């Protein structure tokens, strides 16, 4: 690897981004990183970076207060010009992952932010690769086997997150004829497969928590619905690898468990019932539940159980998915490095154990 590598990264403080930064520092000891990090109230981008970059490695990391939703990513002209002259690779993983944003709000961040990074990359005078971290759920409400080369095939979307990530990916695809780049599509990212550690208790973790605490056992979905999850350690390693792999350029790659490694809702809930010593889940036809049962429950339940009905709306479509993600490109490109996602059922108990030991993120846990 060229000693003059400068990797510009967005999304460094996110769940995946934290792991990715460390993986890049470990795997490419001669490379330098440039992190674009948004200031928060009372906390600068540099202060946020200091929480994720070990002191011994900070000399290799430059931090810039930035915001991908602003022109020139919020950078001053001199900094933008210098980074354009020095950056050799761009990894864009910043996005809003909220399901409840309006379409305009989600587009402002996910689509226009991606456009700004593409414009930066187009002007980067030493660019070797542009790595876009999207999502496998650009497939929207499709079913069956989703190929890596497919994007817009007339599907509808469950939320503005899926729609705007699909629009952003289409924008990236339109630039790949004039720019060396790769599109990566992880599925649902969960904790570390070896330790169970996670800093994000969203997606799969929310319904799991209310089930483990016996607040709810009714699933408005299908027992054979497919849940494709991948551990953050695999995704971080795969992104770090793909960003430097010339064979990956021009490809779209599913970073997913795939048909051989994913699991059904029933398989996961049965394992959870055993681990948490909880009653088996009950499955209800989702159309019946949301048309008739939920309205009745909403007027009869109070307190925490009513809150479950409110919060659970964002997750309802993910209990009905019957699609699998083809991983042919991923297997071809990652196998030489010995990288493949472990089957979901192989590490579920580790995820569960960390949830319990950390009290769902409320307590610090010492990992041996």
Image: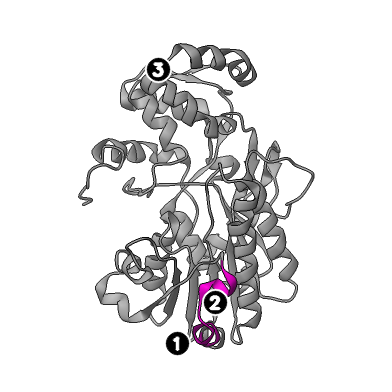
Along the horizontal axis of the image, is 138 left or right of 296?
A: right
Q: Position of residue 64 (x, y in %)?
A: 43, 75
Which residue reaches farthest right? 154
- Which mark sits nearer the N-terminus, 1 or 3? 1
Q: Earlier in the sequence, mark 3 or mark 2?
A: 2
Name the residue tied to disc 1: 3
Between label 3 and label 2, give the one nearer the viewer.
3
User: Does residue 240 lie above or below 211 as drawn?
Assistant: below
| Magenta region, residue range | 70-82
Q: At 34% from the left edge and 45% from the top edge, which residue is drawn?
A: 196
Instruction: List the residue tagged with mark 2.
Output: 89
Q: CA distance from mark 3 to mark 2?
A: 52 Å
Q: Nearer the viewer, mark 1 or mark 3?
A: 3
The answer to which of 71 and 139 lies nearer the viewer is: 71
* Residue at figure coordinates x 51%, y 63% from the top left: 239
Distance (Cα) linking label 1 and label 2: 13 Å
Q: Nearer the viewer, residue 316 or 275?
A: 316
Decide whether residue 50 is among the magenta residues.
no
Identity of the residue drawn at 59% across and 56% down: 134
User: Where does label 3 land, which residue?
Assistant: 302
């Amino acid at each position: 690897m060229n000693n003059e590598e400068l990797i510009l990264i967005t999304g460094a403080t996110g769940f995946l981004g934290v792991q990715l930064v460390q993986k890049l520092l470990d795997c490419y000891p001669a490379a330098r990183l440039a992190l674009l990090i948004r200031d928060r109230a009372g906390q600068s981008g540099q202060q946020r970076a200091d929480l994720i970059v070990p002191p011994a490695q900070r000399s290799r990391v430059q931090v810039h207060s930035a915001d991908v939703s602003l022109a020139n990513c919020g950078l001053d002209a001199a900094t933008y010009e210098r980074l354009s002259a020095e950056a050799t690779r761009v990894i864009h993983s910043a996005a809003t992952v909220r399901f409840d944003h309006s379409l305009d709000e989600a587009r402002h961040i996910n689509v226009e932010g991606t456009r700004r990074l593409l414009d930066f990359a187009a002007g980067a005078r030493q660019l070797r690769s542009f790595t876009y971290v999207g999502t496998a759920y650009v497939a929207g409400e499709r079913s069956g086997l989703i190929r890596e080369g497919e994007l817009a095939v007339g599907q509808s979307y469950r939320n503005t997150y899926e729609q705007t990530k699909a629009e952003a990916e289409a924008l990236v695809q339109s630039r790949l004829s004039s720019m060396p780049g790769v599109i990566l599509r992880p599925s649902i990212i969960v904790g570390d497969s070896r330790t169970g550690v996670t800093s994000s208790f969203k997606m799969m973790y929310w319904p799991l928590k209310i089930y483990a605490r016996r607040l709810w056992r009714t699933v408005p979905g299908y027992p054979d619905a497919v849940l494709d999850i991948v551990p953050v350690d695999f995704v971080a390693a795969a992104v770090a690898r793909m960003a430097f792999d010339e064979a990956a350029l021009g490809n779209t790659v599913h970073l997913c468990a795939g048909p051989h490694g994913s699991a059904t809702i029933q398989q996961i809930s049965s394992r959870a019932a055993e681990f948490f010593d909880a009653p088996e889940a009950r499955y209800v036809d989702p159309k019946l539940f949301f048309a008739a049962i939920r309205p009745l429950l909403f007027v009869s339940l109070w307190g925490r159980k009513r809150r479950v009905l409110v919060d659970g709306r964002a997750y309802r479509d993910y209990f009905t998915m019957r699609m699998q993600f083809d991983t042919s490109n991923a297997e071809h490109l990652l196998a030489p490095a010995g990288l493949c996602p472990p089957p979901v059922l192989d590490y579920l108990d580790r995820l569960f154990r960390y949830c319990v030991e950390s009290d769902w993120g409320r307590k610090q846990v010492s990992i041996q």
